[in-house]
Amino acid sequence: MSSITVPPPKCLQKTFVAPRRHMFGPGPSNVPPRILAAGAEPIIGHMHPEMLEIMSDIKSGIQYAFQTQNNMTIAVSGTGHTAMECAIFNAVEPGEGVLTAVNGIWGERAAEMAERIGCHWALAKHKPVLFFLTHGESSTGVVHPLDGIGDICHKHNCLFLVDCVASMGGAPLHMDKQGIDILYSGSQKVLNAPPGTAPISFSERACQKVFNRKTKPVSFFLDMTWLANYWGCDGKPARIYHHTAPVSAFYSLRESLAILAEQGLENSWQRHKEVAEYFHEGLENMGLKLFVKDKNARLPTVTTIVAPPGYDWKEITSYIMKNHNLEISGGLGPSVGQVLRVGLMGGNSSKASVDMVLEALRDALRYCHKSKV
Ligand code: PMP
């Protein structure tokens, strides 16, 4: 008699093949064969010397992508949210004040994370120790200027934390020059790597705060004291096991950073700008309206289009998925129901992709039902 009471699931007997799809939503983006191939290399141990070398390469790649000399530069094992929590959990202690700029959903989420660890939302008069700002707001399609803000924060003894998940590699960003103290991103947008790793970097000023806390950070997994050691950033000769790094994900991340380095950051910024302008012009020629009126405030990676009046936006996105095998998405958080979002990031940032999206939208507007709303 078998002791098994739950039989092997029938669904797992079917061979799995992932659909081939144009990933033109706000992320994840398509992963090019070269990065997929890197991720398919054989597994080695997470503490083997070759792995430590890969991590060192990743660190250099992130320093380049962020334009920083910060020694405390690593990739967190997890998505953008993990890096967000890593930044907040390490930089602030319960009872301290955090100020977040809400220019879309990400500021709201940062505020919630701070609240969960017992920090209060601070107004300027409450002397915040951390100011959070999203550079590329993927929910609203806004790119926020950063110049000068770091100086103001530092004058008030406050750290400047920036989210560049949706903008890194797609819009100009200079961590050191812009006085950013903590900067984090994600792997699945402009970098075109699979979701699951998140670059993050801490300035000297941020390290002073992070490594002189009175209390331990609430998360063991995200404690920078441990992660700094695992990434060889703490100057100690021995690396101590903290967690099993996602080995394949690090291979892919390394390859994606190598591609960015080969192409050149400035070329990548320029291409995203030109492709976005070409896209925006095409949308306006079709009679569609851009959600962000000010051209300079438009995020080059994720475009928000005013949901065409009289149409059900969900029908448009479903139609395009079904008939064009192409993902675009609706709004998120404050922009739900108001916009369609199209992300053209990394290798997807090309005029050929733009033409494909414009054709799909033209077709959807012809065939979707105007009367449904
Ligand atoms: N910040 C921004 C600006 C984002 O666009 C995203 C992902 N859409 C995140 C944070 C969160 O990243 P993840 O989904 O990888 O956790």
Image (cartoon, rainbow, N blue to C red):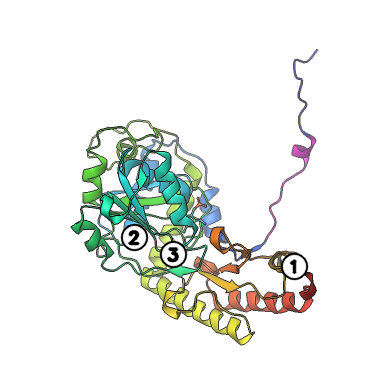
Distance CA(mark 2)–CA(mark 3): 14 Å
Is residue 167 visible in the rendered image? The answer is no
Give coordinates of residue 269: x percent, y percent: 41, 72
Give the residue pinned by disc 1.
319
- Foreground of the two, 102 or 260: 102
Left or right placement of residue 67 versus residue 106 in this view: left
Viewport quadrant of the N terminus: top right
* Disc nearest the viewer among 1 and 2: 1
Give coordinates of residue 209: x percent, y percent: 23, 43
Residue 164 vertical placement versus 86 (above, below): below
* Amino acid at dot 2: Phe
* Disc nearest the viewer among 2 and 3: 3
Magenta-colored segment: predominant secondary structure: loop
Distance CA(mark 1)–CA(mark 3): 28 Å
Residue at disc 2, secondary structure:
helix
Give the residue pinned by disc 2.
66
Task: Indicate yes or no: mark 3 CB to ligand 1 under 8 Å.
Answer: yes
* Amino acid at dot 3: Gly
CB under 8 Å between discs 1 and 2: no
Which range is magenta? Answer: 10-20
User: Which of disc 2 and disc 1 is earlier in sequence?
Assistant: 2
Q: Is residue 2 magenta?
A: no
Give the residue pinned by disc 3.
136
| Residue farthest toward the left in the current orientation of the protein | 155
Give coordinates of residue 339: x percent, y percent: 60, 69
The image quadrant that residue 67 belongs to is bottom left
